[in-house]
Amino acid sequence: MADLIVDATLDDTNRDLKKIKDEFDKAKDRATENDRIWGQADLRAAMSEFANNWYVHRDKITKRLGDLSVKVDQACAAWTDTEKQLSQSLQVEDSTHA
């Protein structure tokens, strides 16, 4: 039977969540940095307006991603503690039967 591997998956998930949150954090700055690539003034204004108007949703998503990341951190810690306790209980049980 294969070992149950949870902590690595949670760590990967959390790393990805933090990358996504970072992208949302930088989105507005990128919109203004990329302003020059849009060329035409109307297009540049529309892209700027979109980036600026989307801040409410972006801020909500960023906050939720941060909250979720904290919960995944807690789940990782809980899993590690549980795994450690299970391992210790098996070692104690093995030594009493030896």
Image (spheres, rainbow, N blue to C red):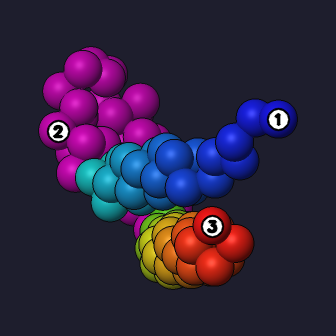
Could you tell me the amino acid type at mark 1? Answer: Met
Q: Please give the residue where the numbered disc 2 appears in the rendered image.
A: 33
Residue 63 highlighted magenta (yes or no): no
Q: Please give the residue where the numbered disc 3 appears in the rendered image.
A: 98
Q: Please give the residue where the numbered disc 1 appears in the rendered image.
A: 1
Give the image location of residue 52, x and y in percent. 39, 61
Q: Is residue 9 left or right of residue 38?
A: right
The answer to whether any part of residue 77 appears in the image is: yes
Picture quadrant of residue 45: top left
Give the image location of residue 11, x and y in percent. 47, 53
Residue 31 highlighted magenta (yes or no): yes
Label 1: element kind = loop
Quarter containing the C terminus:
bottom right
- Tell which tag, 2 or 3, sits nearer the viewer: 3
Could you tell me the amino acid type at mark 2? Answer: Glu
Whichever of labels 1 and 2 marks the residue nearer the N terminus, that label is 1
Picture quadrant of residue 43: top left
- Tell which tag, 1 or 3, sits nearer the viewer: 3
The part of the chain drawn in magenta is 28-56
